[in-house]
Amino acid sequence: MKKTEKLWKPVSGVVGRSCRTFLSSSFNCNLNSNPSQTHFINSFSCSSHLQNLNIRHRFFPNLRFPGNTFCSESADKPNNSTCWNCNAVPKAAPFLFCESCRSVQPLDHSVDYFQIYGLDKNYEIDDENLEGKYKDWQKKLHPDLVHSKSQREREYAAEQSARVIEAYRTLTNQLSRAIYIMKLEGIDVNEEETVSEPKLLTEIMEIREAVEDAADSKALNEILSPIFCVGKLPTIARPVSFAALPVLSCYKKSPGVQEKLIQWSKSFANAFRNRKFDEALTCIRRMTYYDRINKEIMKKL
C-alpha cells in the first residue's frame, strides 16, 4: 500500500500539472471570446509557464499559447535596466554611465546612434551640438579615466567609448548617416554598387582628371568650392577661377564636389521622408562617388 502511495504521488503530480497546463492553454485559445478569463491566465507566473512548457508539448502538441502570454515585458526591457555596480535605476536614457556610482555600463546594442546623442531618428539633424555632446561622453567613458578600476569596467569603457566615436563619425557624415538610417529601416545598402549612367560617369572622370592635374592646394580647394570649372586650356592649369577664364565653349561651369554632396543629400532627405526608398538608394549611390572624390582631395591637401 505504501509503495502504491509513493508511486501515486509523482504520477498525480504530473497529471495535475498537465491538467493545469491544458486548462491554461484552453483558456488562452479562447481568450478573445471571453475577457473574464484573462485574470485566470495571468494568475500563472512566468516560471509556471516555462516549467509546464515541455509537458504541454508532450501531452497536448496541438495547443498553442499566444505570444503575449509569456514574459514579454522582461524581453522588451533594455539590458541595462539597472547599474551593474550599485543597482541604481537610470534617471535618463541612454544608460551608458551611472551617475550614482560613476561606473561605465555594459554596451547595449539596442541603443542606436541617434539615441546616444539625444536625437530623433531623422536624416536631417542639427549637428551644432554634436561635438559638445561627444566631448561630454568622452569625459565619462574614455578608457584612460577608468585605468585604476576593474578589468570588467575597463572593457566596458573601451567598448562604450569606441561606439560613441563611431556614432559621432557616422552622424556627422552625410553619406554615412544616410546609409545608417536606411539600415535602421531594415534596408541593406550595397556600398560597392556602381552606377551605369554615362553622364554621371563622364562628370566623375572629368573631376578625377582635374584632381590629378591640380598643381597645388589652391587648385584642389577650388574643386571643393561651390563653383569650379572643368575643361582643357593648354596654357592654364585646371581647375581655375571661372571669373578669370575667357568665355569659351570648351569650358563649363559646374558645382563643386561639396556642393554636389549637399544637393544629393537634400534629395536623399526628401526621398527618405516620403518613404521612397528606391529613390533614396539612388541618391546614396551618387553621394558615394562624390564622397570618394572629396576624401581623395582631402588626402592631398
Image (cartoon, rainbow, N blue to C red):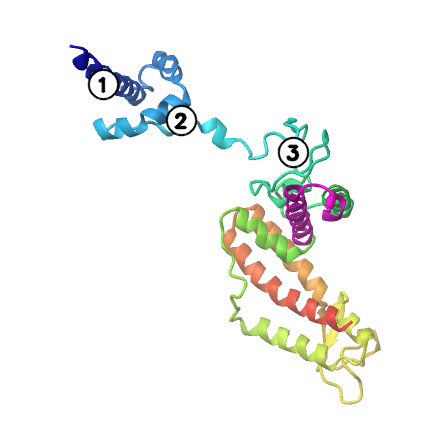
Q: List x then y, in percent, for residue 45.
A: 41, 19
Image point 65% across, 32% down: which residue?
85
Q: Secondary structure at mark 2?
A: loop
Seen in the picture, residue 139 relative to 223 is either above or below; the reply is above
- Identify the residue at horizontal 60%, vertical 50% (top origin): 270
In the image, is 48 to the left or to the right of 278? left
Of circles 1 and 3, the one toward us is 1
Q: Quadrant of the C terminus?
A: bottom right
**Nearer the observer, disc 2 or disc 1?**
1
Q: Residues within 10 Å of mark 1 (few under 14, many from 20)?
A: some
Tell me residue 30's x, y (percent).
29, 20
Q: Is residue 60 visible?
A: no
Label 2 is placed on what type of residue?
A: Phe
Report the magenta residues as a range: 142-171
Q: Which residue is mark 1?
A: 15
Confirm or deny contact between disc 2 and disc 1 (CB under 8 A): no
Left or right: where 152 falls relative to 247: left
Compare residues 215 and 68 and report the one nearer the observer: 68
Percent x, y of residue 246: 80, 81
The secondary structure that dominates the magenta segment is helix
Instruction: Please give the residue where the numbered disc 2 appears in the rendered image.
Output: 70
Q: Is residue 265 above or below residue 38?
A: below
- The answer to whether any part of residue 132 appears in the image is yes
Query: Magenta stretch containing residue 153, yes or no?
Result: yes
Quarter-of-image position of residue 114: top right
Helix or strand or loop: what does disc 3 sit on? loop
Q: Does 42 appear above or below 232?
A: above
